[in-house]
Image: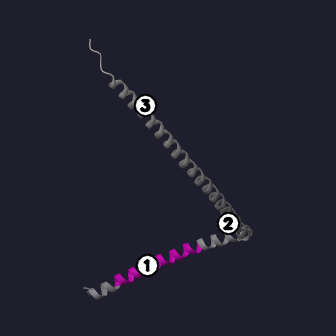
Amino acid sequence: MDVQIRLGDLGLLLLGIALLVLLIYGILVLKNVYASVLKIRKIIEKNEAHIDEIIKQTSAITSSVKDVGSKLSGDVKSVQKIVEQITASTETAAGSIAKNLLAIFIAVLQIAYIIKNLIFRFPKQKK
């Protein structure tokens, strides 16, 4: 008894088997998704009161965050003004100190120059 199978028939058979495997896999995935949805539904039903409470408090929390943000913004602006004032004062003080130090340095150089001129004006005594 010789049975001949054509390649087309073999391809259709393999395609059918692959489709059956894919169908079984899809059914298992849908079963797991359904079980997960049931668990999620139970959790939501169990915690529905808490969820509603959180939803009601969301607007209060949001307004509190806005208030804190606006207060911090004002505080940051105040600190920024103070830092700018300190920077201006520091620059002024540094400029004054630099001018004073420069004046003192120039005075010391002038005194040294005068002393040098006085010393070299007098001839050296020979021994």
Look at mark 1 in the image and give the residue it sits on.
22
Q: Where is residue 111 in the image (x, y as percent from the top left)?
A: 43, 31
Instruction: State the mark number for residue 66.
Output: 2
The answer to which quarter of the image holds residue 110 is top left
What is the CA distance from the residue labelled 1 to the residue labelled 3? 103 Å
Q: Is residue 15 above or below residue 65?
A: below
Region rendered in magenta: 13-35
Amino acid tagged 1 = Leu
Q: What amino acid type is highlighted by mark number 2?
A: Lys
Q: Is residue 30 left or right of residue 21?
A: right
Residue underneath mark 3: 111
Q: Is residue 70 above or below residue 104?
A: below
* Secondary structure state at the residue bearing disc 1: helix
Give the spatial CA distance, label 2 vs label 1.
53 Å
**Residue at 68% from the left image edge and 70% from the top image edge:** 44
Of residues 121 and 48, the one nearer the viewer is: 121
Circle 3: element type: helix
Q: Position of residue 64 (x, y in %)?
A: 71, 64
